[in-house]
Amino acid sequence: MPIRYILKQLLLPPGILLLLLLVAWWLRRRFPRLALACFALALGGLSLMSLPVVVEWSARQLETEPALGELQWAELAGQAQAIVVLGGGREQGDPGWGGDQPSLMALERVRYAARLAKASGLPVLTSGGLHYGEPPSEAAMMAEVLARDYGVAVRWQEGLSRTTWENAVYSAEILKKEGIERVLLVTQAWHMPRARWSFEQVGFQVVSAPMGFLGVPNGRPAGGWLPESKAVWQNGLLLNEAAGLWAYPWMYGRE
C-alpha cells in the first residue's frame, strides 16, 4: 500500500481526529488540560463532519463551475472534440457482478458521460489507472459499463493514472496525438476546479461538465442539523479536495 495513501488517511479528517482522541487518552494523567483540549477538538470536529448542513456549505465553496443545461448538450460538438470522463474509484470482487466494478461515484460520471456522448456524438476517453497495481484499470471498467449498459463505444482508454494530475498528463499523451485540444470534462462538481486546472495546465481547452452537486439543499430532517454517517464520508471527500486544490499549484504549477 503506497505510503502517500497512509499519510493522507492519517493527516486528514477523520483520521487526524481519531488520532487526537488517542493523544487525549495518552495525556489524560500527565497533562489533563491538554488532554481535554485534544478531546474537545476531536469531538467537535467529528460532530461537524457528521452534519449534512456542513456538507452543503462546504461543497458550495468548491462547486464554482455551473452545470450544463440539457438544451446545451447537442451544441457541445461545436465546443469540444472529445469527452473525457475521470475515474472515481472501484469496488473489488462484487459477487453480484462477478468481479470488480466502478464505484458508485464513478458510475454517476459514466452515466452522465453516456448522456452527453449520445446527445453530442463526441468520442469518449475514459481515464483511471490501477488500484494498488491490480487490474483491471478504472478506465477499462468504465469502458465496459459504457459499452454494455449504455451502448456507448469508448474510443480511448487511459489506464495509467493514479491522481487527477496524472489523469490530465496521460490523457494529453493520447489525445494530442489525435490533434485534440478541446475536451468536455466529466467529473463531480466539487472535483471540477482541480480537474479543470490540471487539464488546462497540460494545454487543453476545457468545457466543464460537472455533475453530482453536493452544495444543493440537502432535504434532510431538521435542515441537515442531525448527524448522519454518510455526511462523514462526504465531508471527508470535500476536505481532501480542498487540500488538493490548495496543493496542486505548488506541486505542479508552471510559469
Image: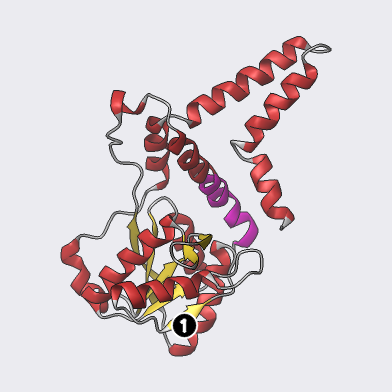
Task: In the displayed orientation, state which residue is furthest to the left.
Answer: 71
Percent x, y of residue 124: 37, 78
141 relative position to 112: left or right = right
In magenta stretch: residue 169: no
Kindly indicate the quadrant of the structure image that contains residue 54: top left
Task: Classify 10 Å Cα crowding around label 1: few (below 14), some (14-19), many (20 and above).
Answer: many
Where is 186 relative to 81, above or below? above
Task: In the displayed orientation, state which residue is furthest to the bottom.
Answer: 178
Image quadrant occupied by the C terminus = bottom right
> Could you tell me what secondary structure mostly forms the magenta stretch?
helix
Residue stretch in magenta: 240-252
Q: Nearer the viewer, residue 21 or 214?
A: 21
Image quadrant occupied by the N terminus = bottom right
Residue behind mark 1:
175
Kindly indicate the quadrant of the structure image that contains residue 82: bottom left
Percent x, y of residue 130: 59, 69
172 relative position to 217: left or right = right
Where is 179 relative to 56, above or below? below
68 relative position to 167: left or right = left
In magenta stretch: residue 244: yes
Percent x, y of residue 135: 59, 73
Amino acid residing under circle 1? Leu
Q: Residue at x 47, y 30 (%)?
A: 50
Say whether residue 127 is visible.
no
Helix, strand, or loop for circle 1?
helix
Kindly indicate the quadrant of the structure image that contains residue 188: bottom left
